[in-house]
Amino acid sequence: MAQIKQSQLRREDFHGKEALDKFYRTYLASSGMAKNIFVFESARHACQRRSVRQFFEEFFQGLLRQ
């Protein structure tokens, strides 16, 4: 995460699944927390960000038009 912050690039330029997987393996795998719970909670917190909400609203509006 420090590298992402230092690079000044948008988070969208990085592979989120790989980052979540590496974070989970490094810090949480030994805790007993199931990976799917970690991913779900990460998504739940991320959806509170305005940019994430806007992305998905536009994404689903586009799907509904088709």
Image: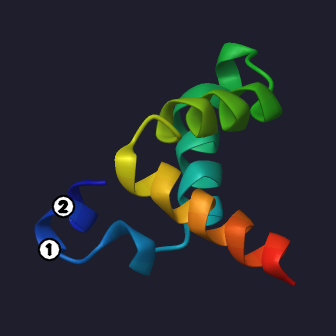
Rendered location of residue 53, percent (x, y): 50, 50
Of all residues, the one furthest to the right in this rendering is: 66
Give the residue at x 75% y 15%.
32
> Which residue, given by chain and number where applicable, does mark 1 sit on?
8
Q: Is residue 19 above or below residue 13?
A: above
Relative side of 11 to 47, left or right: left
Give the residue at x 58% y 68%.
58
Q: Quadrant of the C terminus?
A: bottom right
Closer to the camera in the image, 52 or 4: 52
Give the residue at x 66% y 70%.
59
Relative side of 1 to 57, left or right: left
> Which residue, given by chain and number where applicable, does mark 2 sit on?
5
What amino acid type is highlighted by mark number 1? Gln
Relative side of 53 to 37, left or right: left
Rendered location of residue 61, percent (x, y): 70, 68
Disc 1 crowd rating (10 Å Cα; few below 14, some 14-19, many 20+) is: few
Q: Quadrant of the N terminus?
A: bottom left
What amino acid type is highlighted by mark number 2? Lys
